[in-house]
Amino acid sequence: MKSRRARSQELRLKIETEREADGRWIAEIPDMPGVMAYGKTEAEARARAYALAVIAGDLKKSKRPVSPIQSAESEKKTRKAEQIMSRYRNTLRALSK
């Protein structure tokens, strides 16, 4: 199991990743029980877990049930989180060269 920290202006999270027997990657955020996601690649799993953490954090703050309007807003936030993770991955690639 690998463990790295993801940072943005909004969230700083420890994300653990592991490769499953079937080849998929799973990413989990230990500080947020139930926030885990699968991906074809490690980076995809990490980005999805991060996006879920952003959504879960927003829902926790609002303390309201999820409505279709919130779902649409969550989609926007998911895209933003994926953009943040894309920049994060690009930075990691640049540093590893």
Image (cartoon, rainbow, N blue to C red):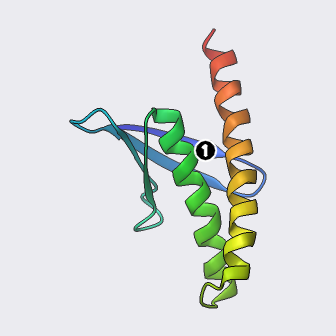
From the top left corner, tell me how far across and down residue 69 is, in percent: 73, 81
Residue at 58% over, 53% down: 50
Q: Specify the farthest residue to the top.
A: 97
Q: Amino acid at mark 1?
A: Ala
From the top left corner, tell me how far across and down residue 56 is, in percent: 58, 71
Where on the picture, by quarter, is residue 70? bottom right
From the top left corner, tell me how far across and down residue 46 is, in percent: 52, 43
* Image quarter of the C terminus: top right
Residue at 74% over, 43% down: 83
Q: Specify the farthest residue to the front.
A: 68
Whether residue 10 sits left or right of residue 66 in the image: it is right
Residue at 73% over, 34% down: 87
Residue at 69% over, 36% down: 86
From the top left corner, tell me how far across and down residue 25 is, in percent: 37, 39
Badge 1 marks a residue whose secondary structure is strand
Foreground residue among 93 and 25? 25
Foreground residue among 69 and 52? 69
Where on the picture, by quarter, is residue 59? bottom right
Is residue 20 positioned above or below 90 on the image? below
Number of residues whose C-alpha sits closer than 10 Å to that of mark 1, classed few (under 14), some (14–19) or many (20 or more): some
Whether residue 67 sits left or right of residue 10 in the image: it is left
* Image quarter of the N terminus: top left
Check disc 1 and report the residue beneath it: 6
Q: Specify the farthest residue to the bottom.
A: 64
